[in-house]
Structures are given as C-alpha cells and as structure tokens.
Image (tube, rainbow, N blue to C red):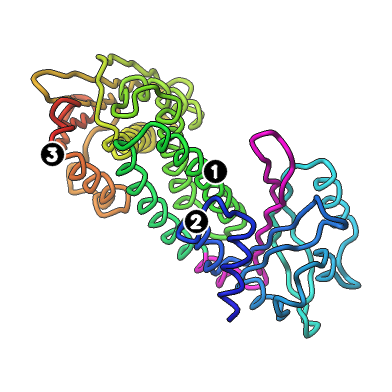
Amino acid sequence: MERTDAVELTDRLHAEQGRGDPFAAAVRATRMPMIITDPRQKDNPIVFCNDAFCDLTGYGREEVLGRNCRFLQGEDTDQGDIGLVRIAIEARTDVSVELLNYKKDGQPFWNALYISPVFTDAGELQFFFASQFDVTDRKERELAALEGREFFERAVRDRTAELEAALAQKTMLLHEVDHRVKNNLQMVAAMIRNQARFSGSDDVKTSLVATLARVETLGAVHRRLYESKDIATFSLSDFISEISVGLVDSTGQSRVQLDLDLEPVEVAAPSASPLALLVNELLTNALKHAFPDGRCNGRIRVTMRSADGEATLTVEDDGVGLPAQPDSRRSTFGHRLVQSLVRQIRGSLTLSDAAPGTRATIRFPSHSAASRP
C-alpha cells in the first residue's frame, strides 16, 4: 500500500511524465531518501516522500506529508547550518549541508542534505527537490553510492534507447520527448553529483565523476537534437568541435594542444548518443593516460573523414604510447563501454602506435549507410 501511495503522489506532481517514466519510478523506488516540498504553499510543506525516506526516519508517510522539514531537527541541531538552508530557500538556489537530525525514536543521525529548486519553463518556482544521506556510517554510504551509480547508468541507457527509437517518427513528438529527457538527465546528473560530493572513497568519487561526464555528454546530444531542424540526422563534426575544447579545458591541461581536422559528417540520429559517448571516452582516455607524471606539453589530434558511405574517426596523441605489456585498463568499465558502443554503431576499433603516442581509429557507416535497416 505504501508504494501505491508513492505512485499516486508522483503522478499528481508530474502528471505529464506518466507512471511509465523510468525516472519517476527511480524517484519512487531508489534507496536514496528523497522528498519534494511545495514553496507555493504556506510554510513550504512536504508534498512527496519516498519509501527510503520513511525507512531512514522511522516516520510513516501520513506523519510526514504536510509538515515542514524542521520536524527532523532537535536540541543539538546546529542553528547556523539551519540558517544556511533558510537563506538558500529564500534565494531559490541550491544548498548542500550536513545536519544533525533525529529519527522518530529519538535516535540522532548525521544527514547529508542536498536541496535544489525546480522551475517551470516560465521561470516560476514550482518545487524544492531534496535528497538525504545518512552519513553516520561512511562504509554503508560508499556501497550505496556504487549501487546507485550502476542503477542510474542503466536507467540512462534504457531511457536513451527509447528516445532514439522515437526520433524517426515525428518532429513534434521528438521535441516534446526530448524536452522531458533533458529535465530527467539534469535530475540524474544532480543526484550523481551529490553522491560524488559526499563520497569518502576516492575510487568511488572518480567513478561517479566519470559517470557524470557521460550523462552530461548525453545531455549535450539531446540539446543538439532538440534544437535541430532535421530530426533524422546528427552533425558529428560540429558536436566534436563543441565538446573536445570543453574536455581539454575541464582537465586544466591548458598546455595540451588540440588539433581538429573534421570533415562534415552526418550520422543517423539513433547513432548520435553512442558516437558522442565514444568521442568522450577516447578524448578523456588520451587526456588521462597520454601525459602522465604532470606532463602537460603535448598534442591531441582529432580527425574525421567520410568516403563511400564509411566514416573514419581518429583520436591521436603524441604521449607515452601503448604499454609494452597488456594494460590492466583494458578490463575497466570505460574499455568495456567503448567496445559495446563500437558494436552498437556497427563499427570497428583499432589501436596502434603513433610513434610517438597512441592512435585510436574507429570506422563506422556514415548517414547514408547507417540509416539502412
């Protein structure tokens, strides 16, 4: 009965997304405690809480709804931290803070709280979205972060596949669906960013940051598809120009020279996401491994060619080159992801010695070939 109530609440808050939306289902079913408050009502009451929130606090749903979040506070809750939350809510902005809260039975717990406002397209403040973490036991939180990362990556892949199937149907349908996806990807990115922020493990944090970059890459793809007048094709060359500069800047390796030699290449819309993720993985790998030990002087060259229905994407660096022995990184999630993405686009991947450096070459059908059944 509790989960039926959660379905009714999320459907009432986001009726346009529907019960079948996997991200609404994620909010209901995830182990991450979550609530939604309505600042348009007096005292900004809670209008939704998921089962994980009830499990964390010991309160039943009927004891939570309609109340302000302050009922979790107690005599030892820091008033200065509460003031930070109050200021952020009045300013309608994000806030993250660790509060000493209390469960229904009086047991205290440290609550890593992240609050983010949700606005309508017209700029009207609609809700506040809040996620909580019991950070009293750091080890349990790290395990939850790993499980959450795998869940969100699977949810993004499933939802992206559904959208790519819809791209070829109708322009108006595409724009409507893509608008919803961007909002959902932003929510997923916010949750992953929050998990990384409160992770006590460097390995977990590194994995989550890599996942966040992949989600943001998917978001950039859908933004371009949404803005494009041609719903059937995707300009891969323009996209590479956009994200490659940003990736280099984000690493802080300002002395790494980026050379782009890109012929205009259009690919079928269903290939847009896997190709974009491939570009992200290859560039990120080059920036991470080609120039070790603080070396920043180097060059990364990205070329794009197309002939006779086949496109060739090459990412080449003049760094340390391929290792003499098989690289243990070949078994990482990133390497498995690249292999899977290459298969999705019916392409091939070749790694070779660039003397000096490493050259990764991907060949795949361009638009005229990729669009055939």
Residue at the extreme left: 308
Q: Earlier in the sequence, mark 2 or mark 3?
A: 2
Residue lying at 71% horizontally and 35% vertically, measured from the top left = 123
Q: Quadrant of residue 49?
A: bottom right
- The x and y percentages for residue 121 are 64, 35
Residue 119 magenta-drawn?
yes
Which residue is at the front of the view, 225 or 202? Answer: 225
Measure the alpha-carbon separation of dots 2 and 1.
Answer: 10 Å
Q: Is residue 157 magenta?
A: no
The quadrant the C terminus occupies is top left
Q: Secondary structure at mark 2?
A: helix
Whichever of labels 3 and 1 marks the residue nearer the N terminus, that label is: 1
Which amino acid type corresponds to the residue marked 3 in the rendered image? Pro
* Residue 205 - label: none
The amino acid on which the numbered mark 2 sits, given as a three-letter code, is: Phe
Q: Position of residue 218 (x, y in %)?
A: 41, 39
Amino acid of disc 1: Asn
Question: How far, Cα to Cα, is label 2 from label 3?
Answer: 30 Å
Residue ID at (74%, 43%) = 125
Q: Which residues are magenta?
A: 115-144
Residue at position x 31%, y 20% from top? Answer: 237
